[in-house]
């Protein structure tokens, strides 16, 4: 049997999704749940790489997956320096930046590290990432802020957004590169991107403080209040960052990372859950509408709502009724992370994509 298997990896805080593909066929699909105590003693997400890699390999072997036939191990891309869209082979520079949390510590950093660790344990397998969260196609005007020392960064759900846009374009028999599309990814974090002719020319800086609040992120906050809280003496810098990303949004209101659980509270008649979810839908709608201005009067062909929260009909309805006058709204529930990674994995095996090289940003001084 030829070496043609693709192993796709999507690590999240409380679980790791894995899938094995043979070109267009799904061979194996698994959500590996992790208990909080599994990671006791690990201060950073990246410290979990070796343990999670062992768990994944054990899971594959126990399910009779021929690991020797895996040719491509491809993970979700993490917090790196800004890069262009595409496929990157995991190299020493990338591993160093991810392992050192050079651009931030987030569970998404595990994607490249897990791919690298697992590939090194296999026979002739190579490790890759694709369309990491730092894909940067912003227009220069989108980077300028009210403080010259602060530039807006491109940090959004590039992988899922681009796959969702390509999928929609294909469904209407058009090319992604000829369409104007607004994509709203509603997951643990929320990002809204303006896709003009194949490039994401603007998006909210979803990682650490811009745009709608989400299940785990606080989103845009009144800056004066934040600054005063920073100097109140109540919190360390690390605690303030955690309040913004990881323990903000729905978590801050309900002490749960699960948007699904909050939606169940709303459906059971909980007034607070109803109010907070309505506010989150309201903020998503405003962010979608703000992206309309980015196209400078050009027609927006579609608004795509995707991600885990897109599975909730009530939440989506509250967004759709506010924005469907801008463009037709297409709902793609769930995150197509593993499917998107397999799409790039197939392109790698068929030699249909350029393999890009990641280079660390030179140190100043």
Image: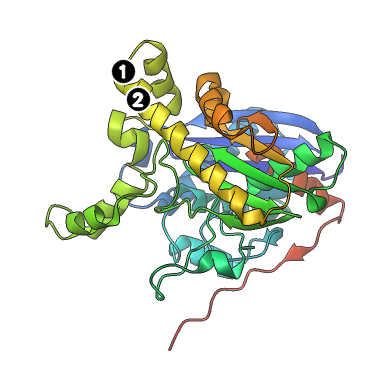
Residues 338 and 251: in front is: 251
Residue that carries the numbered disc 2 in the rendered image: 275
| Applied colour scheme | rainbow
Residues 168 and 101: in front is: 168
Is residue 90 placed above or below 43 in the rendered structure?
below
Left or right, 273 with respect to 71, comes to: left
- Quarter holding the N terminus? top right
Is residue 102 placed above or below 77 in the rendered structure?
below
Residues 145 and 231: in front is: 145
Residue 60 visible within the image: yes
- Quarter holding the C terminus? bottom left
- The residue under the point 34% across, 29% down is 256
Residues 339 and 146: in front is: 146
Is residue 166 placed above or below 235 in the rendered structure?
above
Residue 335 visible within the image: no
- The residue under the point 60% across, 29% down is 30
* Label 2 crowd bin: few (<14), some (14–19), many (20+), radius 10 Å: few
Q: Where residue 349 sits: x, y (%)?
A: 83, 51
Q: Where residue 320 sits: x, y (%)?
A: 58, 29
The label shown at residue 271 is 1
- The residue under the point 43% across, 28% down is 259
Left or right, 56 with respect to 197, comes to: left
The label shown at residue 49 is none
**Label 2 – label 1 distance at C-alpha:** 6 Å
Q: Where residue 243 sits: x, y (%)?
A: 29, 47
Q: Are marks 2 and 1 in contact (CB under 8 Å)?
A: yes
């Amino acid at each position: 049997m030829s070496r043609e298997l693709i192993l796709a990896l999507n690590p999240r805080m409380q679980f790791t999704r894995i899938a094995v593909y043979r070109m267009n066929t799904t061979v194996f699909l698994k959500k590996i749940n992790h208990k909080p105590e599994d990671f006791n003693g690990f201060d950073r997400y990246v410290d979990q790489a070796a343990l999670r890699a062992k768990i994944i390999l054990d899971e594959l072997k126990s399910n009779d997956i021929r690991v020797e036939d895996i040719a491509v191990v491809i993970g979700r891309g993490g917090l790196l320096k800004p890069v262009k869209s595409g496929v990157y082979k995991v190299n020493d520079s990338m591993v160093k930046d991810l392992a050192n949390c050079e651009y931030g510590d987030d569970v998404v950093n595990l994607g490249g590290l897990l791919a690298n660790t697992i590939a090194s344990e296999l026979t002739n397998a190579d490790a890759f990432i694709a369309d990491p969260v730092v894909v940067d196609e912003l227009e220069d005007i989108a980077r300028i802020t009210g403080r010259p020392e602060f530039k807006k960064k491109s940090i959004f759900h590039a992988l899922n957004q681009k796959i969702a846009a390509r999928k929609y374009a294909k469904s209407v028999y058009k090319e992604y590169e000829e369409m104007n599309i607004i994509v709203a990814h509603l997951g643990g974090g929320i990002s809204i991107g303006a896709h003009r002719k194949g490039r994401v020319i603007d998006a909210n800086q979803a990682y650490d403080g811009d745009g709608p609040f989400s299940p785990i992120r606080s989103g845009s906050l009144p800056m004066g209040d934040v600054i005063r809280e920073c100097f109140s003496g109540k919190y360390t810098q690390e605690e303030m960052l955690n309040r913004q990303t990881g323990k903000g949004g729905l978590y801050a209101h309900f002490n749960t990372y699960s948007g699904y659980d909050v939606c169940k509270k709303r459906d059971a008649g909980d007034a607070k859950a109803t109010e907070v979810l309505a506010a989150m839908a309201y903020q998503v709608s405003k962010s979608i509408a703000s992206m309309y201005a980015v196209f400078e009067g050009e027609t927006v062909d579609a608004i795509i709502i995707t991600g885990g929260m897109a599975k909730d009909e009530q939440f989506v309805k509250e967004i759709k009724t506010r924005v469907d006058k801008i463009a037709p709204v297409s709902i793609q529930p769930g995150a197509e992370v593993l499917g998107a990674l397999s799409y790039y994995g197939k392109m790698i095996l068929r030699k249909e994509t350029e393999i890009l090289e990641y280079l660390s940003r030179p140190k100043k001084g």
